[in-house]
Image (spheres, rainbow, N blue to C red):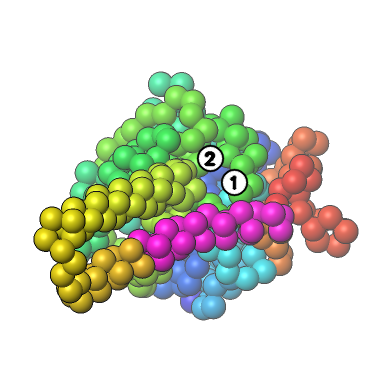
């Protein structure tokens, strides 16, 4: 694959520390990563702030990593964090935050559904409003089926109804975080990660910037309905105990109904004798109570499984290779770089955990 002239790093401003870091998690994005980088480079060229790009290759099975290395050869402001395998987008995003150095960090996907051209507006709002988080809020979702739009609409409302804090509706990971917000998120090392919830949980001043979301530029989405379902369970169980309370109240209600029905049967027996019990009604009651019990056990199991995974305290990810940007590194940033030849294969301060 040949690069166009516009793919070179016209925004490189050597000799300066980056003010803006753009974190891009990637997984099997070979079909569209060059076009994404071209548009991102054009946007960065017009910025007055110095910037860098941190691509995180999340164990891609196609040529994504090779293409990223080629892009880095033409742009000294690109760095690549190559994870040892596919750890999932939430963890890849975390790795990007760990290795970013800018005063503000912008998180964006590589599929061009979130337009890089909105980045200058995020920076303007950050500077004008003195916000710690500036999130891009979708006004529309082009290229998606009515079912996906409907389920997404329902998910955000349900999680806000059940959760302890409000997750901005119709909002993905595309946002700007101040260095203070990044530092706060980096302290949260839980394994079951729902980044949208973590971004909301840290608090600070958060401002929305509305935009029109485009369709995917190339390739296929990695999020099928099964993965989206599991992500929704992850989000709800990570930030709410409501499912456990629902199971408790459902069991209590079933018990109360059973007691009342038992009193009703006793009354009928006293007044009219003991008729033959109806088999269908008995079967329905048994199946109903058995379903409630299994559902309750499943909910308890979801939470218990998360406790089990957290107690193992495994690292969040392993890094196979780091290709840093060709920019000067200050003494304070040295602690955030990984030396793969040393015993400590991760940045200091618990990064990678």
Q: Residue 135's spot in the image, x, y percent?
A: 39, 38
Q: Residue 253's spot in the image, x, y percent?
A: 30, 48
Magenta-colored stretch includes residue 181 = no
345 horizontally vs 298: left or right: right
Q: Residues within 10 Å of mark 1 (few under 14, many from 20)?
A: many
Q: Residue 71's spot in the image, x, y percent?
A: 55, 63
171 or 34: which is nearer to us?
171
Q: Residue 162's spot in the image, x, y percent?
A: 36, 42
Magenta stretch prevailing secondary structure: helix
Q: CA distance from mark 1 to mark 2?
A: 8 Å
* Residue that appears at 41% across and 29% down: 206
* Residue that appears at 71% across and 48% down: 351
Say which mark, if any, is on residue 97.
Answer: 1
For mark 2, what is the residue? 105
- Is residue 204 shown above or below 230? above
Tell me the SS state at disc 1.
Answer: helix
Residues drawn in magenta: 292-313
Tell me the SS state at disc 2.
Answer: strand
149 horizontally vs 6: left or right: left
The answer to whether residue 47 is seen in the rendering is no
Say which mark, if any, is on residue 343.
Answer: none
The answer to whether residue 294 is seen in the rendering is yes
Question: Are the two marked residues, 1 and 2, in contact with CB atoms closer than 8 angstroms?
Answer: yes
* Residue that appears at 77% across and 35% down: 332
């Amino acid at each position: 694959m040949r690069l166009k002239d516009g793919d070179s790093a016209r925004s490189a401003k050597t000799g300066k520390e980056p003010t803006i870091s753009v974190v891009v998690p990637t997984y099997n994005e070979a079909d569209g990563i060059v076009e994404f980088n071209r548009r991102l480079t054009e946007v960065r060229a017009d910025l007055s702030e110095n910037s860098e790009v941190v691509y995180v290759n999340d164990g891609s099975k196609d040529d994504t990593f090779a293409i990223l290395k080629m892009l880095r050869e033409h742009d000294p402001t690109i760095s690549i964090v190559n994870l040892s395998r596919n750890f999932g987008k939430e963890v890849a995003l975390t790795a990007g935050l760990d290795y970013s150095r800018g005063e503000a960090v912008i998180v964006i996907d590589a599929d061009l559904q979130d337009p890089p051209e909105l980045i200058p507006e995020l920076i303007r709002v950050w500077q004008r409003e003195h916000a710690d988080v500036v999130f891009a809020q979708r006004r529309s979702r082009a290229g998606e089926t009515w079912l996906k739009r409907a389920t997404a609409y329902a998910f955000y409302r349900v999680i806000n109804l059940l959760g302890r804090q409000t997750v901005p509706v119709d909002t993905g990971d595309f946002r700007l975080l101040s260095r203070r917000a990044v530092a706060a998120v980096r302290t949260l090392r839980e394994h079951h990660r729902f980044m949208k919830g973590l971004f909301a949980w840290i608090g600070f001043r958060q401002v929305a910037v509305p935009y029109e979301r485009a369709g995917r530029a190339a390739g296929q989405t990695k999020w099928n309905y099964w993965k989206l379902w599991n992500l929704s369970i992850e989000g709800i169980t990570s930030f709410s105990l409501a499912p456990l309370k629902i199971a408790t109240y459902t069991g209590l209600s079933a018990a109360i109904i059973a007691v009342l029905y038992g009193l009703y049967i006793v009354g009928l027996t006293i007044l009219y004798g003991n008729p033959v019990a109806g088999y269908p009604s008995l079967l329905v009651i048994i199946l109903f109570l058995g379903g409630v019990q299994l559902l309750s056990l499943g909910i308890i199991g979801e939470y218990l499984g998360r406790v089990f995974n957290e107690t193992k305290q495994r690292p969040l990810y392993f890094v196979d290779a780091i290709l840093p940007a060709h920019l000067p590194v200050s003494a304070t940033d040295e602690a955030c770089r990984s030396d793969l030849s040393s015993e400590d294969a991760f940045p200091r301060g618990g990064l990678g955990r």
